[in-house]
Amino acid sequence: MHIHEYQAKEIFRQFNIQTPESILINNTLESVHACEKLGGNLWVVKAQVHAGGRGKGGGVILCKTKEAVELACDKLLGTNLVTPQTDSKGLPIEKLLIESGQNIEQELYLGLLVDRQTQKITILASTEGGMDIEKVASETPDKIIKFGVDPLGDLDSNDCAYIARELGISGNLLEQFTNTLLGLYEIFTTKDVSLIEINPLIITDEEKILALDGKIDFDDNAIYRQEDILSMRDTSQEEEKEILASEHQLNYISLDGTIGCMVNGAGLAMATMDLIEHHGGSPANFLDVGGGTTADRVAKAFELIQTEPNVRGVLVNIFGGIVRCDLIAEGIIQAIERVGLVLPIVVRLEGTNAPKGLEILNESNFSIHTEADLTKAALKIVELSK
């Protein structure tokens, strides 16, 4: 689950991470009052959307007058922001963050994530913070400092001091940096975070370390125990299909292809999509119906697939482990009846009672192509979808 920058900064402040003064607004009329309350003669208007690259998309505007702030708010509110991390439609801007301008001396990058190779919480830091951190990571990875923390251990001030030295931070700034990093680590470990980053983390001329931006992604599988975080969810930033899917315990992501996929298990779903692509087709979605597949879930999955405008066929690939294949086959037939599926459909079943499941599908009144072999199933749906 994603949250907005202003929400991330609210959490930062709870954990003693310093941020610039800012005010959230919902309409242009609030902008002048926000500037007066913040004071100064330099403000930044920041679109609140669930995407990075807002600066490159025109969603971060530096203003030197209150009139410029008003114009920026008028320009952004009620529009969609397209960034390098969104699709061509972009994401709706319903809120803006008005923030005090800062005298920036240096921009840093600081983040934490789980490194599955090392099985550690990994701290990433760099002196090359800012909009082009992705380019730095790909072209000059030696400028990224990596520090692994055993999840059964802890991060201490000595670790923070080591990372600070690598970044060239010392003196009066060391304590501020340590507080910031320890705060990030505590958020990461207590809030079921999968990714947290500050880009940029700035050092000002006044020798303050501030989180100029903030991004936090939470583990969806653990969000049920983070009620305060779940209340921050903004469904206006999510695909309608993906919201509907989550309500029925389906993992669904829209893609641009022509072959709808319905699979149980994320790994099997990825392998199925790869095989379709390998044989000349293109998947229209990622859809994991989970291990406890039911007729209701299958029906909802078919409904979602049919809403994709480019779909010309459906491949169902189910491995019956927890649920028997004959029960899955009966569920597929019930779902087709309920949804009125008219697209070509190929079903591949493997696992417990697979032969019986295939027999049920073959004897049904629907035109269902069945295969026991996944490669043959992929070839068949690619052929039918053409």
Image (cartoon, grey):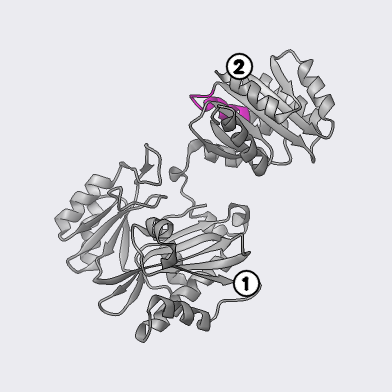
Q: Does residue 190 show up?
A: no
Where, quadrant-wise, is the C terminus in this rendering? top right
| N-terminal label among 1 and 2 | 1
What percent of the width, then of the height, locates residue 244? 55, 37
Q: Is residue 101 left or right of residue 163?
A: left
Q: Quadrant of residue 334?
A: top right
* Local secondary structure at mark 1: loop
Q: Is residue 19 above or below residue 309?
A: below
Region of the chain picked out in magenta, as a range: 301-311
Amino acid marked by disc 2: Val
Q: Nearer the viewer, residue 307 or 107?
A: 107
Q: At 79% across and 37% down in the image, what residue appears?
A: 323
Q: At 76% across and 27% down in the image, what residue appears?
A: 372
Residue 342 has which mark? 2
Residue 150 has which mark? 1
Q: Nearer the viewer, residue 267 or 322?
A: 267
Q: Is residue 13 above or below residue 317?
A: below
* Local secondary structure at mark 2: loop
Q: Is residue 365 left or right of residue 259?
A: right
Q: Are marks 1 and 2 in contact (CB under 8 Å)?
A: no
Question: Is residue 141 magenta-colored?
Answer: no
